[in-house]
Image (cartoon, grey):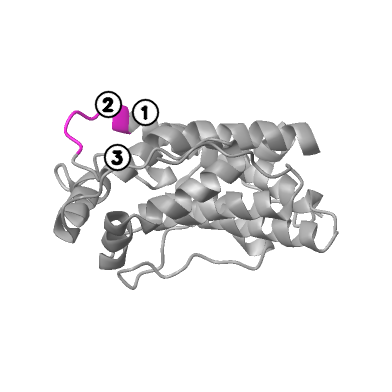
Amino acid sequence: MTTAQRPPPVDSPARAEAKSMIYRLAAVAFGHPLPETQQAFADGSFNQALDSAWQAVTGRPWPCQPASSSFAELEAGYISAFRHGRQGRPQVALVAGEYEELLDGQMRPTFLLNVQAFYKHFGLQAALGDEGLTEEPDHLSAMLEFMAVLTHLEARALAEAKEPTSYRRAQRDFLKRHLVPLLAAIQRRAASEKRLTLDATLIRLIEDLPEWARNQLVELEARVGPYDEKVKGAAVKGRALDQNLWN
């Protein structure tokens, strides 16, 4: 059992990189499973990496979970829960556009354009998924990977003694508008399902990531100011995000 360690200072590159690692590991976990994913769960390397990053950010150990007995079990649980488990529909959708409350009155194409505007500003686009198809920009894995990039850029700025505020503002806005609501919606949906057969690590991430992401948002708002609701209003009305928003 690991013991809690003192996290590095809030403004350190090491802590920003640890946040990036948490987002990146979570993105891998919520992508379609690969045999390598099962191997990392089974041999403990995934939990070891996540525990190290989790302690660096929170000062607390990550509660490691037992792995699925096989890759087949891991993949079957993932497909049943997140792809087409009940009448061809997921028990718990990982795509934000599947949650009416997250669209907040927007048509899904408009919603997707606003998600993609964040990616485009930083020169990113949705990657190819494990099945050779472009991953939906509002998929949880894509959003987590984007946050991993932003926190890595923050770490690099700190390491080079440059101003990290623009990256922190982008993190704040993306957490507030997209990732925190999606994680909360997933958590609620999962809690309402009685027969989820998911890998224990995925269940634990669903339980713990929403609060952790909310804490990141609170920390960011304390450092760079609160989220501007006018930005959300512009998005709901279908206007593109200001490309100089985070400069």
Residue at 42% across, 58% down = 136
Element carrying mark 2:
helix
Q: Position of residue 47 (x, y in %)?
A: 39, 50
Q: Which residue is mark 2?
A: 192
Q: Which residue is mark 1?
A: 188
Front one among 209 and 179:
209
Q: In the drawing, does residue 2 fall left or right of residue 88?
A: right
CA gap, disc 2 and disc 3: 9 Å
Front one among 101 and 105:
101
Q: Which residue is mark 3?
A: 92
Membership of 217 in magenta stretch = no
Membership of 193 in magenta stretch = yes
The span shown in magenta is 190-196
Q: Quadrant of residue 230?
A: top right
Residue at 85% across, 59% down = 162
Q: Position of residue 121 (x, y in %)?
A: 68, 61
Q: In the drawing, does residue 215 fall left or right of residue 209?
A: right
Amino acid type of the residue tagged 1 in the rendering: Arg
Q: Quadrant of residue 124?
A: bottom right
Front one among 237 and 190:
190
